[in-house]
Image (spheres, grey):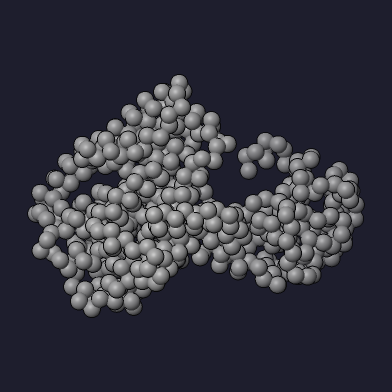
Amino acid sequence: SVVSLILGGFIVIFGLVSYFVKQRLYLSEALICLFVGVILGPYVLQVINPYKWGNTDFITREFTRIVIAIQVMAAGVALPKAYLWRELRSLAILLVPVMIWMWLVSALSIWLLIPKISFLEALMIASCVTPTDPVLANCVVSGRFGLPFLFLAIYLLQMSPGTAIGQWFYYIIGYQILVSIIIGFLIGYIARKLLKLAEERYISLFIMGAVSLIGSDDLLACFIAGNSFTWDDWFRVETAESYFQDVIDLLLNLAIFVYLGTVIPWSSFNEADLGLSYWRLIVVAILILLFRRLPIVMALLKVIPALKTRREGIFAGWFGPIGVAAIFYAQVAKDHFSETDTHARELVIPVTFFLVISSITVHGLSVPLIKIGKRVNTITLSRNQSLELRLTRNLRRTNTPEIYNCDRPKSIVSEREYTPSDMNSPVVQNDSTAIDMELPTVPIKIDRDEDISQRFSIYEEDENIIIEDETDGEVYVINNSTSLTTTPPVTTQANSNSQKSDFNLFPLFKKSSNEQNDR
């Protein structure tokens, strides 16, 4: 009753302030809930103590399994039409070479820093943190596919290499993976047909239970079922305006991370008998977060069709969080360690938990730190010639981003939502922050009463500043070699009117509609 009261109260309070926390502070609910769980847990206030419930490992494993099953089902349903087929090449690269690299780098980092552990044991522990977490990332790239790596290490520890490889191909790849895909696809296909005649739609728990009974991979089956469920895009389109799934996701995230915060094994992080200390775990976390995913994604960027630009590659390579899935696999690994191998058995939980805490903290604070870094009082952008934009006064908040009247030396701000491609752009500011910048007079005639935010789109592309006039389709380009400080008089065009300008500001061209669509 106490747990229900506290958790329910926290969910209500967080719901009231969640917009401010996520849209203004840019903090994830995972980081906040983990911190709340630590405060409420047995090491601080002792309000929630799962260790008194008994069989904590079993509760943790089943709780995480249910959460992941529902989340991967939701991720599969949220995919666009025939996504797995259209993005097959990208997924294949991310699932094979990228995940193998992530597995080996994680294992090598653990093996080098943690004493008294064999490389095979390090591989087994590393398999827990290899897949990207589906709950944190809310994406469909590799979050469900850590099982083969985990059981390959388990079989190599328990059997001869030849027997282990054969058992792995037969039972894991042939039975657990392929059977899960077939069952998930069939259930999703049948449910999609039935849903057009009925309102019943939540089948993830049914799939999880049914597939578990036959010993196959329930999480993979849930994901495949979700994708099969929305293969023709009918369900996703029909529920586009529904926020029920978002509410369920939020409730699951809040509950699971508060719970994980209460069961963190703090005392094991500095256990001399296990060879663990804080400095060792910190170094392991740094190595894994830096080298586990980013280098291999950047190296293979040109052969991954889903990643179009270098910035998208950096984003996908950096934001590969470790979370709920790692805890689930760690509990599974602990159950499969031999009773005689007590050292590795006792290591897997604290090492995995520390990496989860590190990932949630680092990835959870990455976006706020990026936002803070962009809010500076002087912006200097070096192109072929210097380009300086000076703030005329402090930042001010507006409810709606706007582009100021361009016939005065005022600010230019985009109404577009911030994307990674806006990084370092001198004229684009994100979200609802408007900044006054000292700019020369812009040779575009605009009525003073015109709603400029509905007329212009301003962004950066290939190191050029692009200004699009939505009314007539004209595109204005500030080239690399252009400096706002040069003053030779040139003739520029705007809205089909020729006029003189004291600034070489817009070397411009007008694209056809087809060219604009192709760009």
Left or right? Give the position of 334 relative to 463: left
Left or right? Give the position of 453 relative to 323: right
Left or right? Give the position of 213 relative to 448: left
Left or right? Give the position of 502 relative to 330: right
32 versus 305 height, above or below: below
In this view of the protein, can residue 462 be seen by the observer?
A: no
In this view of the protein, can residue 456 be seen by the observer?
A: yes
**Residue at 41% of width from left, 63% of height from top?**
37
**Residue at 57% of width from left, 59% of height from top?**
21
Q: Quadrant of the N terminus?
A: bottom left
**Residue at 35% of width from left, 68% of height from top?**
42
**Residue at 33% of width from left, 56% of height from top?**
326
Q: Judge by depth and name the residue closer to the eye, 25 or 299.
A: 25
* Residue 437 in the image, given as x and y percentages of width and height: 77, 65
* Residue 196 in the image, given as x and y percentages of width and height: 46, 23
* Residue 210 in the image, given as x and y percentages of width and height: 27, 35
| Residue most extreme to the top | 197
Disc tally is 0
| Location of residue 55 (image quadrant) | bottom left
Q: Judge by depth and name the residue closer to the eye, 323 or 443.
A: 323
